[in-house]
Amino acid sequence: MNRTAVFFLAPVACATALLTAPATALAQLSPSSNAPVDVTADQLEVQNQKCLAIWSGDAEALQANSRLRANVINIYNKAEASEKGDQPGQNCGQLDRMEADGNVYYVTPNQVVKGDHAVYAADSKTIIVTGDVVVAQGRNVSSGSRLVINTDTGVATMASDVRGIGQKGRVRAVLFPNQATGGAAAGAAGSRSLAAPVPPPPRRHGA
């Protein structure tokens, strides 16, 4: 099946209201950008009763110079009561959230974030990445099991459930002090290809 080329193209007429819901709520997928969001995938399934669009097969959401890529991206819009007094959920309005599953990459000009699962919440403008999370910014690399990024402020927090010195799986970063720094997670320098693998932090003897 051909890849779906443009976010606003609906495969059936009844899906038009869901797929053409205002994209401005997605604006902060790319920091400080009001550019339109372009979503592509191998297949698109629309569930109007749930206000849900399921993009599967190398799904990718692109806005300006930021990308969210995964095996599957689910886009939920907010259910609204119709003006005619019908049951709530018949109309789909603004974006509620995006959920990405499998081989998740979130890429900006300054960083590449890799994980297993990610949720973008439109109201709070946050991206939460969980699983085996790795962040690469230039040569700097950090890792953990949960990363929260505020796309509005640029503040990022890496966390892990593992505690105690010498325990594997704790939050970890390998930094290069002589590298120009910037950004939120571990310093920034240059951009990486979306398809480029993110290297794990180097292992220290006895770690």
Image (cartoon, rainbow, N blue to C red):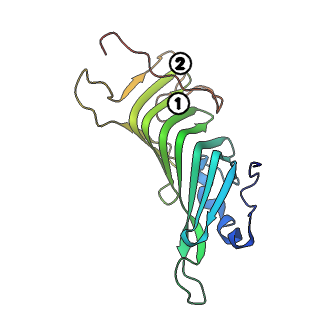
Disc 2 versus disc 1: distance between alpha carbons? 10 Å
- Amino acid under label 2? Gln
Indicate the position of residue 73 as horizontal and vertical percent values.
58, 51
The image quadrant of residue 168 is top left
Residue 179 is tagged as 2
Residue placed furthest toward the bottom? 84
Decide: few, some or many residues near mark 2? Use Cα within 10 Å; few <14, some 14-19, many ≥20.
few
Indicate the position of residue 43 as horizontal and vertical percent values.
68, 52
Give the side of residue 119 with respect to residue 7, left or right.
left
Give the side of residue 118 with respect to residue 18, left or right.
left
Residue 100 is tagged as none
Depth check, front residue: 106 or 73 = 73
Indicate the position of residue 97 as horizontal and vertical percent values.
52, 58
Q: Quadrant of the C terminus?
A: top left
Residue at image location 64% in from the left, 60% down from the top: 45
Reading the image, the residue beneath label 1 is: 182
Give the side of residue 119 with respect to residue 68, left or right.
left
Q: Secondary structure at mark 2?
A: loop
The image quadrant of residue 147 is top left
Depth check, front residue: 91 or 34 = 91
Residue at image location 57% in from the left, 68% down from the top: 51
Residue at image location 74% in from the left, 52% down from the top: 4
Residue placed furthest toward the top? 205
Indicate the position of residue 74 as horizontal and vertical percent values.
56, 55
Total numbered badges shown on the rendered structure: 2
- Amino acid under label 1? Gly
Depth check, front residue: 146 or 44 = 44
Q: Secondary structure at mark 1?
A: loop
Residue placed furthest toward the left? 164
Position above or below: 140 against 35: above
Depth check, front residue: 151 or 61 = 61
